[in-house]
Image: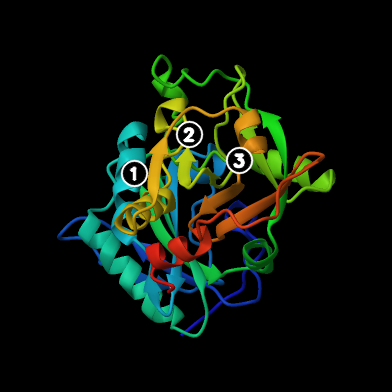
Amino acid sequence: MRAGSGTRDASDGGAAGDARVVVLVAGGPDGPRPRVHPADEPLLLADDLAAVRGDGCFETLLVVGGRPAKPERHLARLSRSATALGLTGPSDDVWREGIDLAAREWGADSEAMLRLVLSRGPERGGTETAYITVAPVGPHALRAREEGIAVTVLNRGYAADLEGSAPWLLLGSKTLSYATNMAALRHAAANGFDDVVYLSSDGEVLEGPRSTVVIARSGELVSPPATAGILEGTTLGALYDVAEREGVSVHRERLLLTDLLAADAVWLISSVTLAARVRRIDDVVLPAGDPQINVPGLVDRAVGRA
């Protein structure tokens, strides 16, 4: 059953309504198993490093018909992020148990976003904090799927090849330190845009604050490489697997803004919004024609919605 109250979550498309599920996750074979936590009761200690430092990592899964989409891809990426942060976290089996419990509590009536959160824990020391939340997919994400989006291009402030020489920046990890991403989205909204595409300081296309960039060009799908210091998209990986099985050519290459402007179509791909077609980049309206590749359909099949 659903419980609690929620607020809009701009990092993953926005939560709406008053339904929310919280599951407390604890690792270790002799420790307590994942259990439902009252959604209206406190969970974190005041000095938890998730709150005071953003020191942790997370994943957000789409729940469709009561089933979490591509959980193994998300667990693998969560493990990579935790390793980069020097965190241990619960085992994958414990996370799976928590995911199943959270999805059952939510039910199958409507789509939801299910978030896995791992924090370093209290500043005073002690165990890491791990929990799961579930909330409705909000109207922002649904509108972006149906209508498309206008995006503005912002400078990320570093070169595309920085990750290899500065691993401490955690550029390929999905950390809780999302303040700059949220600031970018607020800046975009204040100027009449729905989302953001980041460019590196040397002009390469990177990603969105909460999405992966994909273009259709001459019958193929192209996306920036993970070596550009971007997060490896779970939805992109699932999309490319389905596309290849269906005979669509896919590859990764370094892209410039001119490549986006010249493309047959541009999408921002993410786990909750899924495929949002970019209709305008700053003041340039993109072609509205048929790109000959049904990316939303491919994504739906990739996440089990079709």
**Picture coordinates of residue 97, whole percent (x, y):** 27, 68
Callout 2: SS:
loop
Three-letter code, disc 2? Pro
The quarter holding residue 281 reads top right
For residue 263, the mark is 3
Q: Mark 1 points at which residue?
A: 126
Which residue occupies 63% across, 54% down? 277
Q: Which colour scheme is used?
A: rainbow
Q: Nearer the viewer, residue 66 or 235?
A: 235
Q: Which residue is drawn at 42% across and 74% down?
A: 306
- Pointer 3: residues within 10 angstroms few (<14), some, or many (20+)? some
Q: In this view, does 8 lie to the left or right of 267?
A: right
Q: Would you say 210 lies left or right of 97 here?
A: right
Q: Mark 2 points at which residue?
A: 224
> How far apart are the two marked residues, 3 and 2, measured between alpha carbons?
14 Å
Q: In this view, does 279 lie above or below 187?
A: below
**Residue type indicated by callout 3:** Ala
Pointer 1: residues within 10 angstroms few (<14), some, or many (20+)? few
Alpha carbons under labels 3 and 1: distance apart? 51 Å
Horizontal and vertical percent position of residue 289: 67, 55
Total labels: the figure holds 3
